[in-house]
Image (cartoon, rainbow, N blue to C red):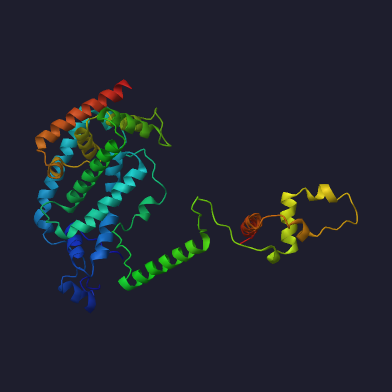
Amino acid sequence: MEQVLNDEELVAAFRNPVTKESAFSAIVKKYRERLYWHVRRLVVVHEDADDVLQNVFIKSWKGLDNFREDSSLYTWLYRISTNESLTFLQSKKRRRAISSDNEATELISQIKAEPQFDERKIEWKLQLAIQQLPEQQKLIFNLRYFDEMPYQKMSELLGVTEGSLKASYHHAAKKVEKYLLNN
Amino acid sequence: MEDKDDIGPILKDLKEQGGNAFIVPEGYFDVFSERLMGAIREAGVIAEENAAFPALASISREMPFAVPEYYFDEIRDYRPRPAAIIPFKKGISIAASFIIIATTGMLLTTRKPFRDGRYQPSIVSIGELTNEQMERFVGSTVPFEKTYSNQPGLTVNTATLLKDVPSEDLSDFLDDSTENVEQSQPY
């Protein structure tokens, strides 16, 4: 039977050359789905999410030896995923010379191009509503609403005070609710 | 009636040793209450937020986006792959082989241009041509069939026909016909 290790044990196993690879595989297995969805919500397209996720795990492999355990492994991986996703979006914007306003339009059209897209379904409307939010609010909304991440963890991850995070989430949720009620 | 504590020697020994094979992570009970209270507080905050945003609270947290089948099963290992390293000596020999092949190929396939830019044809004398080659050349330059085919019994000596044809033209024709034959050869 496969032994389930907690994050501290996984990090310790990663630092042991004998168990390094199996520990990393266990970390990937444990976090792949959560991180994928975190990235996908930001970059929208599956192929882009796959590229970003690949970079996230490659960077994790390279950086895990120097991971100082000031934060949890979970927060550390989320931080890498967030940074990688935002960097990806920035470089895409530069590459295609699109402004921030047009970036939202671009992501909306990508959502609408999804094979299962159905504008009558509330889940899809929610995805469209999220794209109206500024980048930081979008990130906070996704972490809180979908991942139900506690404000204290979000504070560790984003380096923003819990009070600011709560205020940002409330602003974002209000905008999303308004969109859902009017569309 | 049998004594209910009579559990046999093995079980008795195990019981005396603690009898528990399960392992609890170190410090688990020390932080248990703190974690529990944190979870209770968090649930309270989520309930407040749900009450403040009822439309949002009613929506499923499931993502509507599609993911290719078995995608997550296939994400197993994203470790960076080391680049293929070719030993120095082997690398040198591979590079040398490429240079030799490329140079030989160029020498065999390139014809030297004249000063005026035209290519120098191969020098061939009529004596080296086979009858078939000569006939094909004549067929492409002289309207042979029109002139002689309606006169039965008339045989034509191709060498006689070609006596006034310059060697250069013949060589050009040979080069062209050789190329055509090579191109039509199956690999």
Name which residue lies at 50% across and 58% down. Answer: B112
Question: For the C terminus of chain B, which image quadrant?
Answer: bottom right
Q: Residue furthest bottom?
A: B9
Position of B140 with respect to A57 (left or right) is right
Query: In this rendering, is residue B2 above or below A35?
Result: below
In the displayed structure image, the side of residue B104 where residue B31 appears, left or right: left
x, y (%) of residue A49?
Answer: 32, 45
For this rendering, which residue is in front, B7 or B2?
A: B7
Task: Note whether A74 is above or below A111 in the view shown.
Answer: below
Left or right placement of residue A42 versus residue A169 in this view: right
Residue A151 in the image, given as x and y percentages of width and height: 14, 40
The x, y position of residue B45, in whole percent, is 16, 36
Q: Which residue is drawn at 35% across and 52% down?
A: B72
Image quadrant assignment for residue B171: bottom right
Query: In the orientation shown, which residue stands out farthest toward the top?
Result: A182
Q: How many labels does the image show?
A: 0
The residue lying at 13 percent from left, 58 percent from top is: B28
| Residue nearer the viewer, B85 or B184 | B184
Is any atom of residue B8 visible in this view? no
Q: Residue furthest front?
A: B164
Q: Can residue B162 be seen in this view?
A: yes
Residue A20: percent from left, percent from top:
23, 65
Q: In which quadrant will I find the N terminus of chain B?
A: bottom left
Question: In which image quadrant can residue A139 be found?
Answer: top left
A179 or A111: nearer the viewer: A111
